[in-house]
Image (spheres, rainbow, N blue to C red):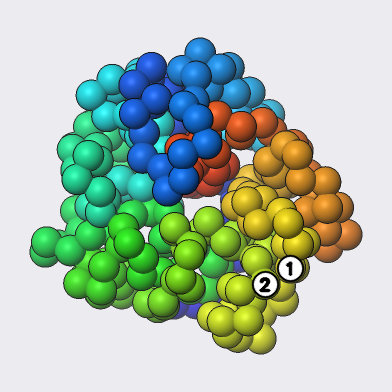
Amino acid sequence: MPHRDGLSWTFTHAVTRTPADSVTDGLRAVDTGNPSGAAFRAEHVAYVEALQAAGLTVDVLPPLEAYPDSCFVEDPAFCLPNVAILLRPGADSRSGEAGEIKSALETRFDKVLEIPGEGHVDGGDVLMLDDEILIGLSARTNKVGAMAFATLLGDLGYNARVAETPDGVLHFKTACSTLGKGVILATKVMIDSGFFGDRKTVEVPEGEDYAANVIRVNDVVLVPEGYPKTKAAVEAAGFNTVVLPTHEARKVDGGLSCLSLRFSLS
C-alpha cells in the first residue's frame, strides 16, 4: 500500500467500554492480585478524558459483566478509516466480544466486515504503521487467523506482514508501539528480532518493558504512569507525552492501546 502519513496516529474517533466489576475474573499471565472494578473505572475516566483532550470524539460503551475482559476493546476488532473488521480473539472466554461490539461499530462505519475462516486474531497482535500492518503470531493469534486477516487487508489495499512474536511476549503490541513519523518504541528483544528493518526505533529502557505499550494520538503520546525513563526517551525522540495510570489494567495484562479502538472518519 502507499505510505499514508498519519494512518497510525491521526484519529477523530474512539470506541471504549467501561470496565465491569467482573474484571476481577479477567485473564492474566501472572497473578499480581485482582483489579478493583471501581478503581479501574476511575482510571478509565481519566483515559477517556485524555482521548477527548487529544481531539477525539469518544463513544463509551456500557460494561459487560458476562465478559470480564471486554473493556479491552482493541482485541475483538480492528478499525481503518473506511471499514471496521471484527476479529476472533484466541481466548475462549472472549469469543462473544466481537458480536457485542458489532452494533457500536455499525453506528460509525458503513462497512463492518468479519475475519474469514476459523482462525484466531487478537487486535493486541496487530501493529498499524503508516505503510504496513504487522500481525504477530502469539498464544492468542494463530497462523491460520493471521494469514486470513492479512489476505483480507490485502484485498482492501493494505500491505500486511505476519511475524513471530518473541517467546514470553503476550501480544505483539505488549512490546512495541508506533510513535508516528516512522518511529517505533520497542523493547530490546523486539528491536533485536529484526521485525522493523531499518525503521527508526526508540528502545524501552531496562526494567520498563511494560511501558512499550503507548499510543500516539494526534499531537500527544499517552504513556503509562510509573515509567519515567520511557517517558524521557519518548520526549527525547521529539514527542509530547501525557501520563496516565494503568495500574488496574496491568493486573489483567492490559495496557493503553487495549482500551480503545481509534480511527479517523474525516
Who's the residue at 83% across and 46% down the image?
228
Q: Residue 144 appears at what percent x and percent y?
A: 20, 72
Quadrant of the image containing the N terminus: bottom left
Mark 1 touches mark 2? (CB < 8 Å): yes
Q: Earlier in the sequence, mark 1 or mark 2?
A: 2
Query: Residue tagged by mark 2?
Result: 188
Examine the rendering and report whether any part of residue 171 can be seen.
Answer: yes
Indicate whether 215 appears above or below 54: below
Q: Nearer the viewer, residue 264 or 52?
A: 52
Left or right, 133 with reference to 231? left
| Residue 203 numbered mark, or none | 1
The kind of residue on which mark 1 rests is Glu
Quarter of image, res 137: bottom left
Who's the residue at 27% across and 34% down the image?
101
Q: Nearer the viewer, residue 29 or 223?
A: 29
The kind of residue on which mark 2 rests is Lys
Quarter of image, res 252: top left
